[in-house]
Amino acid sequence: MTRWNRFYQKQLEDKKLKALVEQELEALRIGEKIAQLRDEEGLTQTKLAAKAGMPSSKISVIENAPQNLEIVTLLKIARAANRRLKISFSH
């Protein structure tokens, strides 16, 4: 284990910090899913954005650093990629 990994693991013992890290990772997973979906449909960020009626910079931000995403934005992206949005809550 590297020094960085030991430091990181030690920091995650703080429950508040761990919750923040997990929240950020979850947001990044959403962005990753959108990038994957876009690739599967053979769309560039620009093409997906045009189909969704938003600037390509918004797609880039969502894929790389998503924050405060609105459901309507996710719906537009899903429709533009010929998909349905499914939201689920799990343990």
Image (spheres, rainbow, N blue to C red):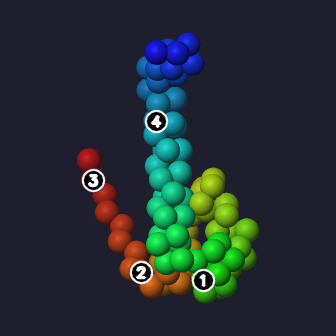
Residue topped by disc 2: 83
Q: Quote the CA–CA distance across marks 4 and 3.
A: 16 Å
The type of residue carrying mark 1 is Ala
Q: Quote the CA–CA distance across marks 2 and 1.
A: 12 Å
Secondary element at image label 4: helix
**Whether residue 30 can be seen here:** yes
Asked if the residue at tag 3 contacts the one at tag 2, i.e. Cβ–Cβ closer than 8 Å, the answer is no
Vertical position of residue 91 compared to residue 67: above or below: above
Vertical position of residue 88 compared to residue 48: above or below: above
Label 2: how many residues lie within 10 Å, few (<14), some (14-19) or many (20+)? few
Secondary element at image label 3: loop
Label 3: how many residues lie within 10 Å, few (<14), some (14-19) or many (20+)? few
Pinpoint residue 44: horizontal percent, then vertical percent. Answer: 63, 74
Residue topped by disc 1: 52
Front-lying residue, 33 or 91: 33
Residue topped by disc 4: 19
The type of residue carrying mark 4 is Ala
Q: Nearer the viewer, mark 2 or mark 3?
A: 2
User: Along the polypeptide, which appears first: circle 4 or circle 3?
Assistant: 4
Front-lying residue, 74 or 68: 74
Q: Nearer the viewer, mark 4 or mark 1?
A: 1
Residue topped by disc 3: 90
User: Along the polypeptide, which appears first: circle 2 or circle 3?
Assistant: 2
User: Along the polypeptide, which appears first: circle 4 or circle 1?
Assistant: 4
